[in-house]
Image (cartoon, grey):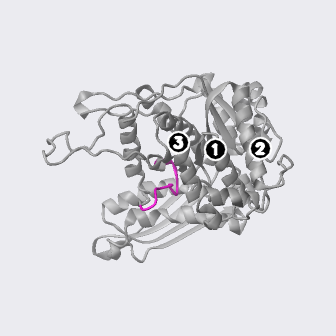
Amino acid sequence: MSEITPHEGNLLVLTPGLGAVATTFIAGVEAIRRERAKPIGSLSQTQTIRLGRRSDHRSPLIRDFVDLAPLEDLEFGAWDVFKDDAYEAAARAEVLDQEDLAPLEDFLHSIEPMSAAFSKEYVKRLDGPNVKEGATKKDLAEALREDIRRRKEETDADRAVMIWCGSTEIYMKPSECHLSIEKFEEGMENNDPSISPSQLYAYAAIKEGVAYANGAPNLSADIPALEQLAERNNVPIAGKDFKTGQTMMKTILAPGLKARMLGIEGWFSTNILGNRDGEVLDDESSFRAKEVTKSGVLGTILQPDKYDELYEDLNHKVSINYYPPRGDAKEGWDNIDIFGWLGYPMQIKLDFLCRDSILAAPIVLDLALFLDLAQRSGRDGIQEWLSFYFKSPHIIEGHVREHDLFIQHFRLKNTLRVLGGAEPLTHLSENYPMSENVSEPTPSSNE
């Protein structure tokens, strides 16, 4: 295990996007720092981690076990197409009540967005005046790098992480310019349309040694060029698409149904959402990117190739509907047609009235702290152990994408145990001694 560089100084958290998710995250951190709220939903702040046998009764909080940056040392920076500061943006998003925002107004007014690298070509339902100009995409990427350096200096930050909290871009597949960093940089110089703004942010972050996570389904850092650059520059990366509402419930329910060997004939999922994300996803090209990440979870969990009689003919439908009156209070409705003993049919109806940004904000916090820990631990490239937080986890080529929330959670905690200098758990040694022919698993350098 690599020696971990201790946390010192300030950690700058950069968010492309200063909308509902980013402002809810920033306001929440400040409210917690002022002891006006609790960090509910954050594993890094509220969850314990068992060490050794259960009978040893050693279960410290994660934040007390590994050397995470404390909330008091977090600084913030953001980009957005609108000029609203964090207070104005939060008020416009209408996620948090005015009575919760008002005590934080002074702090939130101090966070003003930097001009965004943005093109309406990639997010067709969004536009704004606070946009950078540049002759080439390389010029825009260099401007983003300068923003990172300047914001670090302004906040006296020793290190930084970047978490994409912007809107969903149109669906894209990797192209020739994504195959190597040399081709990618040439593509930026030539304004290749295959290079989207989110890829410019990822490039700028990695070039500046800043860990990067993608909270949307965009094709971003999950291309060979930026994967190679991340390894070359010793930068950890993770993604993609925050796992919050309906998909989170799927990755909880599907493993349970499979564990009981219950068949599934159909899974119909629909969403209504009224915030900026809902408006953006009302465009078919942006929805396609989201549809891919939302639809991909069941196949890996259920393994229809192994359990064909139970899942091979599963009919899985996903839709998202923009409904402005709902605002950030997203509703995910699922109808699941299952069958059991002797093939007899049953149904599950699930109506999840969730708050999208309330579920996403603690994910942003955890990713920022865990990616910073990973970087100080000498871990670079794709961080598969952070799959717990994503609909479509970024994985190393040749690996199988894991969607089972409980397996993801077990892997996350085992990696934290290793980073903290403890043995990973197998659950075999609690009541039975390990066979002398079986060794404890050792996570790879990228887990």
- Which numbered disc covers residue 207? 1
Where in the figure is residue 366, as x and y percent of width and height? 53, 38
Lower sequence index among marks 2 and 1: 2
Amino acid bearing label 3: Asn
The dominant secondary structure in magenta is loop
Can residue 192 be seen here? Answer: yes
What number is the disc on residue 143? 2
Q: How many marks?
A: 3
Q: CA distance from mark 3 to mark 1?
A: 10 Å
Q: Which residues are magenta?
A: 388-398
Instruction: Report if residue 390 lies within the magenta region.
Output: yes
Along the viewing direction, whichever of 437 and 13 lies nearer the viewer: 437
* Amino acid type of the residue that numbered disc 1 sits on in the rendered structure: Lys
Residue under numbered circle 3? 234
Q: Is residue 133 above or below residue 8?
A: below
- Tell me the amino acid under the disc marked 2: Ala
State the image quarter where residue 153 is shown. Answer: top right
**Residues marked 3 and 1 touching at CB (< 8 Å):** no
- Tag 3's secondary structure? loop
In the rendered structure, which disc, 2 or 3, sits on the residue that comes first in sequence?
2
Q: Secondary structure at mark 1?
A: helix
Q: Is residue 20 above or below residue 29?
A: below
Q: Nearer the viewer, residue 61 or 374?
A: 374
Quarter of the image that includes the N terminus: top left
Residue at 38 percent of width and 58 percent of height: 255
Of 85 and 326, which appears nearest the observer?
85
Residue 196 image offset from top left, x and y in percent: 70, 58
Q: Nearer the viewer, residue 387 or 46?
A: 387
Residue under the image location 77 percent in, 25 percent down:
106
Would residue 88 be counted in the magenta stretch? no
Report, in whole angstroms, how far the alpha carbon at label 2 lies from the one at label 1.
Answer: 12 Å
Q: Earlier in the sequence, mark 3 or mark 1?
A: 1
